[in-house]
Image: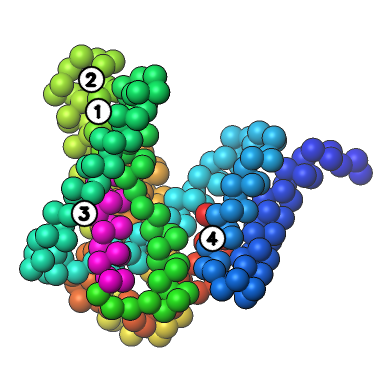
Amino acid sequence: MVFEAGRIFELVGWPAVLLIAWLAGELAHRGLSVPRVCAYSLAGIVSSALNTVQADAQTTAALSFLANFALGLFLFELGHRINLRWLINNPWLLISGMAESLLTFFVVRGIALAMGQPDDIAMVLGALSVATSPAALVRVVNDLRCSGQVTERALHLCAINCLISVLLMKGAIGYWQLLASGSLVNALWNSAAILAVSVGCGILIGIPLPWLLRRLRADERGVTTVFALAVMLVTLLTQGVNVSPLLAALTLGVLIRRRKLLLTPAQRNFGVLGDLLTVFL
């Protein structure tokens, strides 16, 4: 049997990179006492710079789903830690988060325009710069067992940044459609419909989930499995209708907390699954 060397390297390349990233994270954490996710990020940057192989369409689609699923898990856990009543009682936290996000957007957009980028590309760069990495923050919080008011403020600000980043990105897409079609109504309707369907998908999965878990009285492993499957279902559903899986996962986490279904029985970081997907991200 004849094997194609290029195909073999393509198949084993990214699992080998994951293993190297995991080893780098363990060595960095034990030797330098730095969070593992820092080494994971550095390994990903180096591997992407050295990678010259173009993945096929099937591999790209699979990796895209894994990335959305992994981010969905962290956004679900982040959303579950959001206390809406605290934001209402402490409005300055919400105001400062919104001000920080908008300031970042306009500064990055202005820099991009000054460097000669088109207005639509500058808007996308500004929207992407607003988002704080929920995967890195949640992982560091869980690894270092952080707790207290500073930690909760950081998590809430991260959620605000991610939400505003999604809104700005959909606004940029609406701006593209406005330039293409010239219809303001169509542009606003499309952006609003995407946001509404994304939130609706999270609500659709989140409403029956608390009832199911209370009826089953699942243990720690069972709760972790159900939450992971719910996020996977939300990811597949939103990708199928071409809306935002990240906003849906964040909505699902917030709704689960509002339904008074605490995450404490579940494993932090979703156990081994969360550890593996953290390395993948």
Q: CA distance from mark 2 to mark 3?
A: 29 Å
- Residue 178 appears at what percent x and percent y? 23, 20
Q: Which residue is mark 2?
A: 178
Residue at position x 13%, y 54% in the image: 95
Q: Nearer the viewer, mark 1 or mark 4?
A: 4
Between 258 and 37, the one nearer to me in the picture: 37
Give the quadrant of residue 211: bottom left
Label 2: state its secondary structure. helix
Between 21 and 245, the one nearer to me in the picture: 21
Instruction: Identify the magenta region.
Output: 150-166
Q: CA distance from mark 1 to mark 2?
A: 6 Å
Q: Residue 8 in magenta?
A: no
Q: Is residue 271 left or right of residue 129?
A: right
Q: Which residue is mark 4?
A: 38
Amino acid marked by disc 4: Cys
Q: Which residue is mark 1?
A: 174
Amino acid marked by disc 3: Gly
Q: Residue 164 in magenta?
A: yes
Q: CA distance from mark 4 to mark 3?
A: 24 Å
Q: Earlier in the sequence, mark 1 or mark 4?
A: 4
Between 191 and 211, the one nearer to me in the picture: 191
Amino acid marked by disc 2: Leu
Answer above or below: position of 40 versus 45: below
Q: Is residue 240 left or right of residue 250?
A: right
Q: CA distance from mark 1 to mark 4?
A: 35 Å
Residues under numbered marks 1 and 4 in contact, where contact means CB atoms less than 8 Å apart: no
Q: Nearer the viewer, mark 2 or mark 3?
A: 3
Q: CA distance from mark 3 to mark 1?
A: 24 Å
* Dominant secondary-structure state across the stretch colored magenta: helix
Q: Which mark is residue 97?
A: 3
